[in-house]
Amino acid sequence: MKHLTLFTLLLAAPAAHGQVITKLSNGTSTFYYDVNELPTIINNASDNDTIVLPGGPIACGGFTIDKRLTLIGAGILNNGTPVTNPTLLVYGFGQEMNIQAPGSNSSFHGIYFGRGVKFFGGVSNISFTRCTFNSFLLGQFGMTAGSNVVVQQCVFESGISSGGSNAPQNLLVENCVIAEGINFGQNSIASAIVTQCLILPVTSSNNINPGIQFRNNIFLRNTPAIALNTASSYYDNLFVLNGGSNLNWTNAIDGGGNIATQLTLNSIFVNVNSYTEFNENSDYHLTPGSPGLAMGSNGQVGLYGGPSPWKEGAIPFNPHWVSLSPSLGTTNGGTINVSFTGAAQEN
């Protein structure tokens, strides 16, 4: 039922015009035609409701997730949403999405968060799939960071931070793009795994990120040498450095299987030209001769390895329109026959 509603919604909203939000609650669908009322819709929702967002920009105010909800957007990349456009929660100063403890067990899919995502004390069991984050703060200053948070196939534009709070516990970041670094602070020990990710550029700081395991990732940096984050553990990672291959392991833990190389980017990937910026039009598949193909515990490192490989287009669910071709047929007693041919991507 959830998939059928998404299918109908995407057909009704081919672009930013005519946007509709659908709320699914106890088998009943309710439609809202002013998407900027999203904070009110969320405030009036009930536990276990699903809110389906259209493609295009949503310039609403900030809102709080204080109940168990599922939010589903149309997707985050232009090349994955040619009919609907990405679902974008437009940036506004002080207009964050705040997740509080009663919002534990919520999930988010296919949404571009142009505003900050913040966790408040006691939040647990939150999942994000195929989302983009302008800012991702796992805990406010002095608060306990979110625990049991799972993030899969997402894009972090400004890194991941704990905001000076206690470090996160049982965090899994899998098959994601992480730009601008990871900083969980130095005053507490995290329990976190970052695996099968593309991390650009590599960052380093003393006593940062204790307790984090980096596994099967590809790190990029436009430099011949890098000092690794102290107190973190590294297993089966590929470090691609420009002009050198020097890794400084002082106080970091080398768990084995790590490789540093000064090969060009296009000797690693099919078509990539930046060490510092993610480009959705680049091709991050590994080339046939890439060293990353024959390493790691899952057969290859990076976005396309592991049990949850990066999905082309990064769209959230099937059915999802990737093409829509209307055609007019012959009239029949004054009725114009219209046929629509659509192509949907699975999974």
Image (cartoon, rainbow, N blue to C red):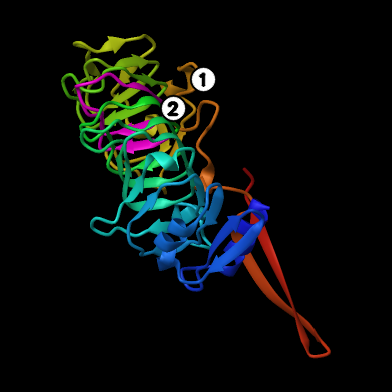
Is residue 264 shown above or below 8? above
Q: Which mark is residue 64?
A: none
Q: Does any portion of residue 43 appear in the rendered image?
A: yes
Is residue 107 shown above or below 265? below
Q: Which mark is residue 298?
A: 1
Highlighted magenta segment, given as a residue range: 176-203
Out of 160 and 302, give the one closest to the viewer: 160
Mark 1 secondary-structure assignment? loop
Instruction: Classify 10 Å Cα crowding around label 2: few (below 14), some (14-19), many (20 and above).
Output: many
Quarter holding residue 99: top left
**Residue occupied by mark 2:** 196
Instruction: Classify 10 Å Cα crowding around label 1: few (below 14), some (14-19), many (20 and above).
Output: some
Is residue 197 inside the magenta stretch?
yes
Is residue 22 inside the magenta stretch?
no
Mark 2 secondary-structure assignment? loop
Q: State yes or no: discs 2 and 1 in contact (Cβ < 8 Å).
A: yes
x and y percentages locating residue 71 in the rendered image = 50, 50
Please state, as top left, top right, bottom left or bottom right, where the C terminus lies in the image.
Answer: top right
Of the residues shown, which amino acid type is indicated by label 1? Asn
Q: Does any portion of residue 151 appear in the rendered image?
A: no
User: Looking at the image, how many numbered discs can be counted on the residues?
Assistant: 2
Q: Residue at x 48, y 61 (%)?
A: 55
Quarter holding residue 43: bottom left
